[in-house]
Amino acid sequence: MPYPLGVFEIQFDFREHHVKIFTSEGPGALRPLRAESVAAFYGGLSESLASVGIAVEINHRPQEVADAIPFDQDYAHCSYDPLYAQRF
């Protein structure tokens, strides 16, 4: 995706259980995938992006989901199981 300094990419690695952020400028970020609330993941991903100079605005409300909880307010959904992620 383009951003003012170049381009960046976000990869979900379900074998090593982390999110990788790559930039064309060199610095990147790594964030573990673990059991935490959607709100905590959303906040942590936003912080990881900011740490490499990427400012983004993400629509807080999930699309195509009935009665969606905004990402930054969702403390109800907290599961992540590495074993099942690898099985998938």
Image (cartoon, rainbow, N blue to C red):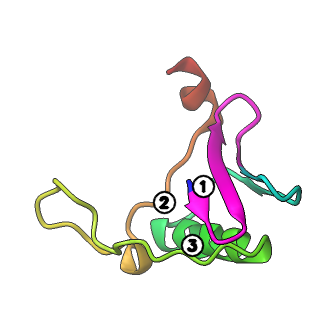
Q: Is residue 9 left or right of residue 66?
A: right
Region in magenta: 2-20
- For image coordinates 38% across by 68% down, the residue present is 76
The residue beneath circle 3 is: 40
Please tell me whether the stretch drawn in magenta is mainly helix, strand or loop: strand
Q: Is residue 5 left or right of residue 84?
A: right
Measuring from the top left, give residue 10's x and y in whole percent: 63, 49
Query: Does the magenta-highlighted stretch encompass residue 19?
Result: yes
Measuring from the top left, give residue 75's x and y in whole percent: 43, 73
Q: Is residue 33 above or below residue 41?
A: above
* Amino acid beneath label 3: Ala
Specify which label sits upstream in the sequence, 2 or 3: 3
The residue beneath circle 2 is: 78
Query: Does the magenta-highlighted stretch encompass residue 34?
Result: no
* Amino acid beneath label 1: Ala
The image quadrant of residue 65 is bottom left
Measuring from the top left, give residue 83's x and y in whole percent: 62, 28
The image quadrant of residue 69 is bottom left
* Amino acid beneath label 2: Cys
The residues tagged by marks 1 and 3 sit, at their Cα atoms, a distance apart of 10 Å
Q: Residues within 10 Å of mark 1 (few under 14, many from 20)?
A: some
Judging from the image, what secondary structure is the residue with disc 1 in? loop
The residue beneath circle 1 is: 35
The residues tagged by marks 2 and 3 sit, at their Cα atoms, a distance apart of 9 Å
